[in-house]
Image (tube, rainbow, N blue to C red):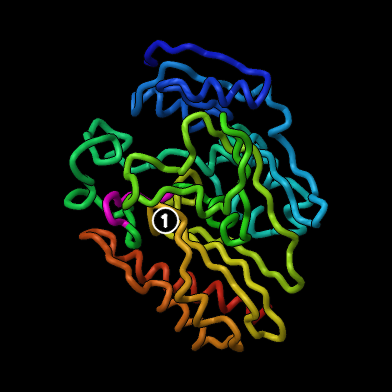
Amino acid sequence: MFEDFAYTRPDTVAQAAQLLQEEAAHALAGGSDLLGCLRERIFPVKTVVSLSNLKDLRGIARTAEGGLALGARTTIAEVVESTEVQTLYPGLAQAAAEVASPQLRNQGTLGGNLCQKPRCWYYRGDFDCLRKGGASCLAVHGENQLHCILGGDACYMVHPSDTAPMLQALDATVWVAGPAGDRSLPLEQLFMPPGQDPTRETTLQPGELVTHIHLPPPEPGLHTRYRKVRARRSWDFALAGMALAAVTEDEVMRSCRIVLSGAAPIPWRVTHAETVLTGQRLTRALCRAAAEAAMQGAEPLAHNAYKIELFRNMIQEELERLIRS
């Protein structure tokens, strides 16, 4: 059962931002994450601010520069089905297609997928974990087979989004509206590392909401791909995932961005692997070396060391596709 709360549906972004400044106010877009959190009473709620009247926050359009602008209220299914996304950034269409089930992709939004709450069973359960204001992360000495191996620091959850790693690999920019006006920031700066604040998932300030995501025009020779490994074919979140945006010429890696999912509390860019690859002719040995470099600094917990080899093999396989393509 839900606790009692007020429900409001503003007509403008400015009105929504004003309402979201209030204590225990939460934005409602598709609701596939928020309603579950309310049902499980994970955090207090006094006001639900529906974004359903904000039509400008939905849709996909070409930008003047030749990239794409995606509204935060655009559904995941619309991202999957978009001809522009499939043509310019097929890896993003792949990542969106890996989100949850068809029913949830029809309901869930791109902005919601970026800003969703953790799926850690301690956070979602009746436990006083660090992210909910407790003294420590209970996964450290508990059941941690699905938790992070990189960047844990304070909280060892893994970021649950499939679209976030791919958008970060594509060097996306996020547009945010709030009481102080509009601002933009690189997508990677949207996510809050637990070492800075383990109680927050994003850097959004009270009253702020994501309105659009902008993608730069694709470079010639850009190859994009998203790979997700999970325990079951549908429904599950990533045990390991990899977003790749690479520019190659005659099998030489001119530039690349690799961002992992299922590895860390935020989408995790593996710059060590990118350094190994950039400027080099792709060989199987080089792909293996990059996969090894990607796991530099990994610190598994008691039950998730299997993820290291899982990531290594997945990264090597995906890089070797560039040799064959």
Q: Position of 210 compared to 229: left or right?
A: right
Q: Please provide percent x and percent y for residue 162.
A: 53, 51
207 vs 128, nearest the viewer: 207
Q: Which residues are magenta?
A: 152-159
Q: Position of 111 compared to 119: left or right?
A: right
Residue 318 is a magenta residue:
no
Q: Please provide percent x and percent y for residue 150.
A: 35, 62
- The disc labelled 1 sits on which kind of residue? Gly
Looking at the image, residue 136 lies above or below residue 299: above
Q: Residue at image x 34%, y 49%?
A: 196
Q: Is residue 75 visible?
A: yes
Residue 74 image-quadrant placement: top right
Looking at the image, residue 254 lies above or below residue 130: below
> Which quadrant holds the N terminus?
top left
Q: Residue furthest right?
A: 64
313 vs 247, nearest the viewer: 247
Q: Please provide percent x and percent y for residue 146.
A: 33, 53
Q: Residue at image x 40%, y 23%?
A: 38
Q: Residue at image x 50%, y 19%?
A: 48
Secondary structure mostly seen in magenta is loop
Q: Position of 218 compared to 170: left or right?
A: right
Q: Please provide percent x and percent y for residue 275.
A: 51, 79
Residue at mark 1 = 262
> Which quadrant holds the C terminus?
bottom right
Helix, strand or loop at mark 1: loop
